[in-house]
Amino acid sequence: MKKKIISMFLAAAMVLSLAACGSSNTAKSEGSTDAGKKTLKVAMECGYAPYNWTQSDDSNGAVPIKDSSDYAYGYDVMMAKKIADELGYDLQIVKLDWDSLIPAVQSGQVDCVIAGQSITSERLQMADFTEPYYYASIVTLVKKGSKYENAKGVADLAGATCTSQLGTIWYDKCLPQIKDANIQAAQESAPAMLVALNSGRTDVVVTDMPTGKAALVAYPDFKLLDFSGSDDNFKVSDEDINIGISVKKGNTELVDSINSVLSKMTKDDYNKMMDEAISVQPLSK
């Protein structure tokens, strides 16, 4: 009798075991279907408003940052969402510092970088780029009351203490055009250069129009100087102000796919999207 009970118990256990295996296989099958959808891995700083920034919730459609409890949003995230939606991809945002962006796409850690990068000849040697997804003019930021607040051109900035962000055309190409400039060390991020200006450590910051407009929201004491209508503007090429999406060298399939989305958009579409990003950016400094 004891053996019979044990045999019945073992049989029941075997049935349960088989049932459990059946459930596991079913779940695995459903999971593989979800996993079959491609994921577009996009790198950005998540600290370069209005192009991209970090926030604590998913308001306005922000996207979770990989390996973080925070979310990313801004113009770059809005563009990444549009591209992923139209191409039928899931979207993953990867937060990296500025100097790590190109190496990440070179190594295959991410599929592309959408981070306000100018399409320079130097970067084109390291990665392929899509068509521009934004066109950014160069502007200057000073503090109201500064001796430079009424500057009408680059010549009026002579002798200024100035800085900008590391690894940008603003720092490398624009600041040296200011006569007798006291060029400080480059700042590691856009927020850092704005803090330097706000604290009085520097007189002048050179940046692009979207970053300048966003700065005015966060720092009401700043004044934006736009020399584009004068004969004394910063000398930059189209490649310096055309903002593109970088991908790994030779990945023509992804470049063509992204370009197919961008080709449906106009400069007005880009500007409207950027204005929306500026309107919802965090005001924290």
Image (spheres, rainbow, N blue to C red):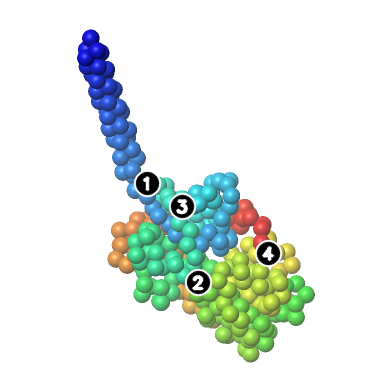
Q: Could you tell me residue 177's position as x and y percent?
A: 58, 85
- Camera-side mark, 3 or 1: 3
Crowding around mark 1 (Cα neighbors within 10 Å: few <14, some 14 to 19, many 20+) is few
Residue matched to label 3: 66
Sooner in the amino-acid sequence: mark 1 or mark 2 = 1
- Callout 4: helix, strand or loop? helix
Q: Are marks 4 and 1 in contact (CB under 8 Å)?
A: no
- Callout 3: helix, strand or loop? loop
Residue 24 lies in what quarter of the image?
top left
Q: Could you tell me residue 218's position as x and y percent?
A: 68, 61
Does residue 174 appear to the left or right of 21 in the view shown? Answer: right
Identity of the residue drawn at 57% across and 85% down: 176
Q: Which mark is residue 216?
A: 4
- Camera-side mark, 1 or 2: 1
Q: Are marks 1 and 2 in contact (CB under 8 Å)?
A: no
Residue 144 lies in what quarter of the image?
bottom right
Question: Is residue 31 or residue 138 the one in the foreground?
Answer: 31
Residue matched to label 2: 241
Residue type at mark 2: give it: Ile
Residue matched to label 1: 88
Residue type at mark 4: give it: Leu
Q: Could you tell me residue 182's position as x and y percent?
A: 64, 86
Q: Could you tell me residue 60's position as x and y percent?
A: 57, 47
Residue type at mark 1: give it: Gly
Crowding around mark 4 (Cα neighbors within 10 Å: few <14, some 14 to 19, many 20+) is some
